[in-house]
Image (spheres, rainbow, N blue to C red):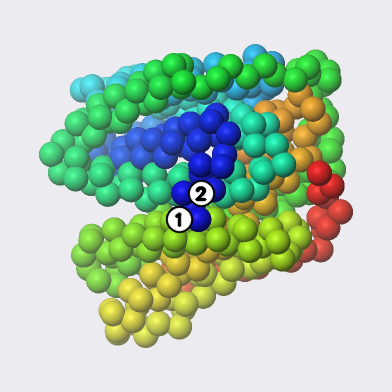
Amino acid sequence: MRTARSFNAQPLPVRLLLVNQLGVNLGFYMVVPYLAVHLEADAGFSLAAVGVVLGVRNLSQQGLFLVGGTLSDRFGPRGVIIAGCLLRAAGFGLFALTPSLPLLLTASVVSGAAGALFNPAVRAYVAESAGDGKVEAFALFNLFANAGMCLGPLVGSALAMLDFRIGAATAAVLFAALALAQAVALPAHRPAPAPSTVLGGWRNAFADRRFMAFTLATAALFALQNQLYLLLPTAAVEATGTEWSTAAVFGAATVATVAFQVRATDWFRRRRSPTASIAIGMGLIGAAFLPPLAAPVDEPGLRLAAVLLSALVLSVGVMIAQPFVLERVADTAPAGLTGTYFGVYYLLSGLLAALGTAAAGLVADRAGTAASWLCCAALGLASAAAVARGTRNTVRTS
């Protein structure tokens, strides 16, 4: 009921964008977790070719975040959001065709560029529409995003059992429907006058020392959240020997987020400062990777329970930290540069998340899974310490 009340209290544009984010993540995670398997097992591509396709998609998205944020500032976020949904529909539609390497590379570039367009634009629109209620709006945003993120693989697995191309085509139709819905219902949003040229805005963001320190301190949030799709599912399958345990990991994360996101944000907003809330959340994210280290190797049930506990604690840490992180980015940005600051934030944190995910996989391959758990725990706890020590005076006066 509290979640429903909080949702109904949001301005219409925010409510529309919350539903949009649920659909965006649902469509994305219906397809991307199964893309590598499809290309290797069904289409017969080499692992090297698969790596190139996935790498191009990630590079296209992460490399263009700044462009998407800048376009949002210059032309208003509404059009950028609609264009991003249309591009994602086109990209996933290409994935549904008979694969060839040129076609797949085109699909990867198009779908990656789509995410780079609407990700900073959506957050800038939410921040500017919600006003003083940004942290509550971003709490709901996290809830809807995580629900789509966790439901997507479940729907995608059912469609992949029929044919991967059916799942890709379904996602393309979903993105086209989202673009149409935003075109019809999302109000126009006039951007604030930009205080400088495009290059001047970029220099402003990269020269903002407090903002850059905060970005680097909290980039671990995204690197460690990504382990919900790498380290934790792999550990669950290793513990049980069955693929269904992956669904249990996603289910634990979804239930935690839906049940506690709004309550947690409200509690921390009233009782803790934003800096303390972020630090506590990052500390929990780091601690989430410790339970599997204590689970007996020869007890599959306890090992699975430890992994599910990790998923639960990780989700709680993300739900505490993320709304305040997004609020801080929005509050730091000068008028007219909200999209640019979100673009820079997601550019840098996305690149660091990619490096962190690759490093976790490398450590697991060379030193064993236990070392990978320890590295993730250390990264989260170090981030919590950096936030608590180094960003106390970063913006929070609104």
* Residue 285 % position (x, y): 57, 64
Q: Residue at x 61, y 48 (%)?
A: 136
Residue 344 image-quadrant placement: top right
Q: Secondary structure at mark 2?
A: helix
* Residue 32 % position (x, y): 35, 39
Asked if residue 199 can be seen in this view, the reply is: no
Q: Which mark is residue 5?
A: 2
Q: Residue at x 73, y 46 (%)?
A: 328
Asked if residue 165 can be seen in this view, the reply is: yes
> What amino acid does circle 2 point to?
Arg
Q: Residue at x 61, y 52 (%)?
A: 322
Using residue 43 as the reference point, say whether residue 307 is left or right of it: right
* Residue 107 % position (x, y): 37, 23
Q: Secondary structure at mark 1?
A: loop
Q: Which mark is residue 1?
A: 1
Question: Looking at the image, which is closer to me, 100 or 147?
Answer: 147
Query: Distance between the Cα atoms at labels 2 and 1?
Result: 6 Å
> What amino acid does circle 1 point to?
Met
Q: Are marks 2 and 1 in contact (CB under 8 Å)?
A: yes
* Residue 311 % position (x, y): 44, 65
Q: Quadrant of the N terminus?
A: bottom left
Question: Looking at the image, which is closer to me, 224 or 43?
Answer: 224
